[in-house]
Image (cartoon, rainbow, N blue to C red):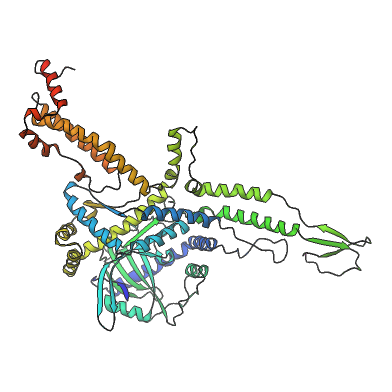
Amino acid sequence: MRTIAIGDGKKLKLTADQRLRLGNFLQSSHRDAIDQRFGVEKMWESSLRSYQGQSPSDPRWRPFKEAPVIEVTIGAMCVDAVAAQANDLIFQSKPILLIRPCEETWEPHADALQYLVDREVESKAWNFRPAATEAIIDVTKMGNFVLYVPFTKTVRKTDVRKVESFSPKIYCLPLEDFVIPTNSTKDVQSCQFATMLLHTSKKQLNLKARLNNWTVDDAVGAETNSPLQQTRLRTAGLAGTSGEKYERVTIADTFCYFDLDDDGIESDLEVIWNVTSGGILKVMYNRYDSRPFVLEAYQDQAHTWVGLGVMAMSEQFERMATELWNNHVWNAMIANMKIFKGPSQAMQETEEIYPGKFLVEDNGKIEAMEMGEVNSTAINAFTMLMAMVRERTGTQLLNQPVRNTSRTPANTMAMMSQQSNRRFTPQFDNMREGLAEGARQCLYRLQERVKDPKTRKEVMDYINELMGEERGALVLELFKRKRPLMEAIDVQLAAVSVSTNKDADRQSLTQLASQVYPLYWQALQQLAPIMAHPPFPGADKVAKQAGEMLNKLMHKILKTYDQLSEVEKLTIDLDDITPVMAQLGLEQIPGQMNGMINAMGQNGGGPPQQ
């Protein structure tokens, strides 16, 4: 079974001058971008090695030969804590993704789209959870993650039949295989170019070329992987190659803005080209409404796309802790060693220091010398350092529960329990937004296929078969709009804070049902009789205004509950109650309203006195 990205972009015919200028632009810009991020890739390599606990290749000194050097994996402990919390936060919510209408008109369409998203995510058709898991590991460990969301076709051929299926899929790209200009931000849609590198064999390249109308050249790439990919495989205990004997080809899929006609207006292009030879395989206008990439960071750094990960935050602390710990181990080892001094006739030795060494001293006797003494200085410094790194990365607030005592005020407890939320708000918001954008890209891919007359029928049949004709008609109506899809609906990740869990969700919904809704319904009960039987002229208008204001307030309250996606269906319109109340006599009005009317009658039938 093989899954490949497909597209029907029309191939452009370029003049010799256009091809030359475009080729020069691609090669020079990518060479500069890759060269200028040399320091960033070194930081990524260091993060991978430190996470695996590999010993430093060049320790600064050793007190004796073969002294052990052990890497203290402080950063890895922090990464594991944050990644585990992020996974629990995101995937414990059901549904994982929420569809919210931007206007009341699109509420039925949003409900239908919610059904589609739930089916595709739970059935793993979109590959959402595997991609999200890899993205969380990348972003916490290395500071960034990149998602690639193409429209794919899966073919499975057996001796009985050939099965084909198609859908958008989310893939988490290795950071070394994604290239953008050095001075860009993480807004992939606005940067000069965004490139995905694809390492493939000649045979796979020929298959892709046949399906996508590429003009293949004969150039091949080097057999070796990139330094970062080699480090990734080596730290995982894998070989540097796949073991297959084939010539590797590095193909770049570049989305760029380039003045193709030399008229001062940049065209939005997609270019497939060979990185080794610089040969252009195919040029077409961008076949996507939105570039199929999502770039997000863990800790944002201003004016750059490079994020700061947990490993980079703890790097200096880990280096210092490693040296302190190794010095403590060395001291413990040499404290149990002795060397000796005595006459030169007793023994002849080399100049190396080791346990039991003999030093020459012609004073007529042999004496033992102490090499070290046990002390707790290094351990005390190490303990302080661990507290500092937990404070820097925030894992101390994340891991340690808040302990209540009889003397702790309730307000203080509430503030302490929210500290981890505030500390991780930017980081978890970035993860939420990045993964939600991946789901939006899946919807963009479906909408693009619906808008294309060549593929509209197969996508419509697929949606109708999956959802039924009634829901499918609503989704297709939404996809056929000429306006951007996100003007009608919005896709959000259900998890909203680091402390959100099922018990908290259940408690908040219980509070909504037991405290908020009874007050809301009681207020409506008091306003409905006034609208049906106004006790004085104009009372019905005042009651209607009060009902509208009450519903607006209720909408704001309900929108703070992220588990609720159908806010409009959870409120009551007074206009729907008034006809029923009008058919009832005054004797059916609640006793509270009778008392109010009687009080108004005592004032001469006029409005109540202020």
Q: Which stretch appears magenta?
A: 350-354
Q: Is residue 317 left or right of residue 194?
A: right
Taking the spot 65% from the left edge, 50% from the top edge, the residue there is 379
Q: Main secondary structure of the magenta part?
A: loop
How many numbered dots are placed on residues in this image? 0
Q: Nearer the viewer, residue 404 or 69?
A: 404
Q: Please report the residue visible at 62 percent of the width from the left and 61 percent of the height from the top.
A: 70
Question: In the figure, is residue 503 to the left or right of 104?
Answer: right
In the displayed structure, 526 sits above or below 53; it is: above
Residue furthest to the bottom: 159
Q: Nearer the viewer, residue 186 or 59?
A: 59
Can I make out residue 125 in this image? yes
Q: Magenta stretch containing residue 352, yes or no?
A: yes
- Asked which quadrant contains residue 450, the reply is bottom left
Instruction: Let me know if residue 25 is in the magenta part.
Output: no
Quarter of the figure that contains the N terminus: bottom left
Q: Is residue 215 among the parts visible in the rendering?
A: no
Between 433 and 289, the one lying in front of the other is: 433
Residue 198 screen position, x and y as percent:
38, 71
Q: Residue at x 44, y 83 (%)?
A: 245
Q: Quadrant of the C terminus?
A: top left
- Residue 525 spot, x, y in % from top left: 16, 33
Vertical order, 530 against 45 (above or below): above
Residue 418 place in picture, x, y as percent: 43, 41
Q: Quadrant of residue 219?
A: bottom left
553 relative position to 88: left or right? left
Residue 43 x/y as whole percent:
51, 60
Q: Residue furthest right?
A: 364
